[in-house]
Amino acid sequence: MAIDFTLPPEVLEARDRIRAFMQSEVAPTEAHLREKNDLRAWRPALQELREKAKAEGLWAPHMPREWGGMGLRPLAMAFVSAECGRQQFGAYVLNCHAPDEGNMHTLLHWATPEQAERYLRPLVDGECRSCFALTEPEVACSDPTQLRTRAVKDGDGWVLNGHKWFISGARGAQFAILVAQTDPDADPPQARNSAFLVDCDDPGWQIVRDIETLAGRGNHCEIRIENVRVPESALLGERGQGHRLGQYRLGPARLAHCMRWIGNAETALDMLVKRALSRELHGGVLADKQGIQWMMSESALELYQAKLMVLHAAYLIENKLEFRNEVSMCKHHVANTLWKVIDRAVQVHGALGYSTDTDLPDMLKHARSARLVDGADEVHLSRIAQFVIDAVRETGTVRRATGGEALL
Ligand SMILES: Cc1cc2nc3c(=O)[nH]c(=O)nc-3n(C[C@H](O)[C@H](O)[C@H](O)COP(=O)(O)OP(=O)(O)OC[C@H]3O[C@@H](n4cnc5c(N)ncnc54)[C@H](O)[C@@H]3O)c2cc1C
């Protein structure tokens, strides 16, 4: 029987060590910092946690050992990321947070040895941060063939001009992976874009503002790029491969988001159930009410589906099998599960759930962005539909598009 849900001992060990670290170090520090309510205290406290994580060998779990990471593969990372997702800064403490985590994967796969030494090494070591710059205000970036940021060949280098926004982590980033049009007339249109490594201290890289969002300012910045000159060696991957690189990056990066969201949704369900068990009314507790039980059951069902879907997609990535449809399904399902479960937890907490006396409002505000980032819901739905249609046209059945031949 090929399917075996027994976890290999090394995956169990990594999960348990990281779970213990999150419970004994990260959770109490975060709780203390929240209580103290002093923004300046966060940075040094998180830095101290990062050093502890490194000292305990819990650093950059997704990176190979030869790069200083734990060498965990996508399936093991599913467990680790869910543990991280239970704390606000869990992934950052282990240096596997977005967007650096996705950028590390991208650099590992696409960078030349010189680029890897210059950009990947300090990123894995935690000496710098990075950002990924694709989205632009002027065009619908669900269709990145329309990008207006241009890279024009000039002598032995390139000159970049353009406008980006919602670039997460841009303030404080040392470098950006920037996607720009190099070949506006290329056919197919997917060959129009190329990716560049840009140093953020270039005077032409200008942060206009940290955009105020539903969840406050989260370092999602608007950037103007004016006459930024980069050498030919700044091209990441080949000319015209920007779209492919973006797709490659988004596969595992989307899944990593899903894994963290599962941890976050489970935290919300824990809160929902604990509140329902302790809130007394009509001679019993909220948990006795069928309406509340259904919220629990629906959340548990959705989380169970989410976990199985994520594990299957991680298995596909790990074994170098086709994964795009399954990752799209995961991204859509988990982002919506996160939103629904937190919303139900708010409901069960009553007025308390609407107050900032709990973390729920904060969790809900952040969860809303999950349905937009890394492809909006509708983009994934239309892609999934295309897989279904193609499957029927080519094979006469939807089976290939509903989890593949390896499933039922
Ligand atoms: C918190 C946050 C962080 C982000 N971080 C980054 C980052 O670090 N780097 C980066 O480059 N970008 C980032 N983004 C941008 C994000 O990836 C884009 O917002 C997203 O890809 C959608 O692009 P758009 O905003 O241009 O929306 P548009 O392309 O204008 O789409 C608008 C809406 O149209 C609908 N739509 C789109 N396509 C279809 C379709 N085929 N069928 C039906 N309906 C459709 C969807 O509802 C979509 O939400 C971030 C966004 C947020 C909110």
Image (cartoon, rainbow, N blue to C red):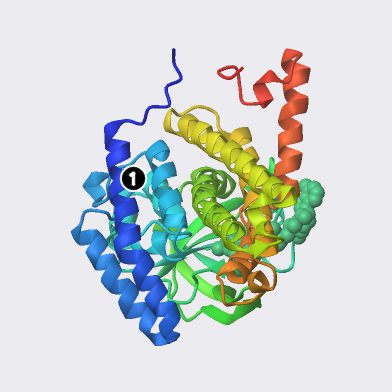
User: 216 or 292, which is in the foreground?
Assistant: 292
- Quadrant of ligand 1: it is bottom right
Q: Residue furthest left?
A: 55
User: 221 or 269, which is in the foreground?
Assistant: 269
> On the rendered image, what quadrant is the C terminus found in?
top right
Q: Residue furthest front?
A: 283
286 w.r.t. 88: above or below: above
Q: Position of residue 141 (x, y in %)?
A: 70, 57
Q: Residue at x 26, y 60 (%)?
A: 53
Q: Specify whether 354 is left or right of 50.
A: right
Residue type for callout 1: Arg
Q: Secondary structure at mark 1?
A: helix
Q: Residue at x 60, y 43 (%)?
A: 300
Whether residue 3 is visible to the viewer of this picture, yes or no, is yes
32 w.r.t. 389: above or below: below
334 w.r.t. 282: above or below: above
Q: Residue at x 63, y 34 (%)?
A: 325
